[in-house]
Amino acid sequence: MASKDKEVKETPLMKQYNEIKRKYPDACLLFRVGDFYETFGEDAVRASKILGITLTKRGAGSATETALAGFPHHSINTYLPKLVKAGLRVAICDQLEDPKMTKNIVKRGVTELVTPGVSMNDEVLQSKTNNFLASVFFANKSIGISFLDVSTGEFLAAQGNAEYIDKLLQNFNPSEVLIQKKQ
């Protein structure tokens, strides 16, 4: 006698979360649910370790069980800098409408993407040093590099061999480096 596999039902909230997460796969998604920012799955595991918060489960014991970790929304300025300083890209997903004004699931969307190189948060930035985002472009025998500090507007660009670019990276010590190769 063969048993039928039950189709795993995704809740509307998790369906919405998964759709948004697919758009930001390399970011830790802080998903606003009521008065909390919640993280799910691998994001929850990472966030709980970095932030020292409890790792629990959503749908415990069911086929849709997933890791969960969250914190009160009013604590964002405490927790966001810790995630960014740990080197994570963080997508902040907020509720885009008043939950009291809808009978369906609340519309949500990413309102800010914070990375180590583009943070404007005073808790992440250090007032005595630049917070450079570097972009390196590899083309044939030459390498191009640019540095941008979004907090001051400072922008620098150069090109040269690998040794020169390495020296610039060491001197400017960027918070984040983006790499692109000529195709």
Image (spheres, rainbow, N blue to C red):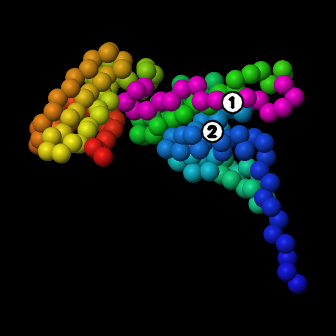
Residue reaching furthest bottom? Answer: 1
x then y, percent, for residue 163: 11, 43
x then y, percent, for residue 10: 77, 50
Q: Main secondary structure of the magenta part?
A: loop
Decide if residue 109 is in sight here.
yes
Task: Give the structural element (helix, strand or loop) at label 2.
Answer: helix
Residue at 54 percent of width and 34 percent of height = 91
Pick the residue in front: 69 or 166: 166
Task: Give the structural element (helix, strand or loop) at label 1.
Answer: strand
Residue contact at pointers 2 and 1, CB within 8 angstroms: yes
Residue at 53 percent of width and 48 percent of height = 46
Pick the residue in front: 101 or 172: 101
- Give the residues drawn in magenta, as a range: 102-119
x then y, percent, for residue 82: 47, 35
Which of the two discs, 2 and 1, labels the residue nearer the N terminus?
A: 2
Look at the image and say whether residue 103 sits in the magenta stretch. yes
Residue located beneath label 2 in the image: 20
Up the image or down, 57 lies above or below 126; here it is: below
Quadrant for residue 4, please give it: bottom right
Q: CA distance from mark 2 to mark 1?
A: 9 Å
Residue located beneath label 1 in the image: 108
In the picture, measured across the screen, residue 13 lies left or right of residue 104, that is left
Residue at 27 percent of width and 43 percent of height = 182
In the picture, measured across the screen, residue 146 lies left or right of residue 57, that is left
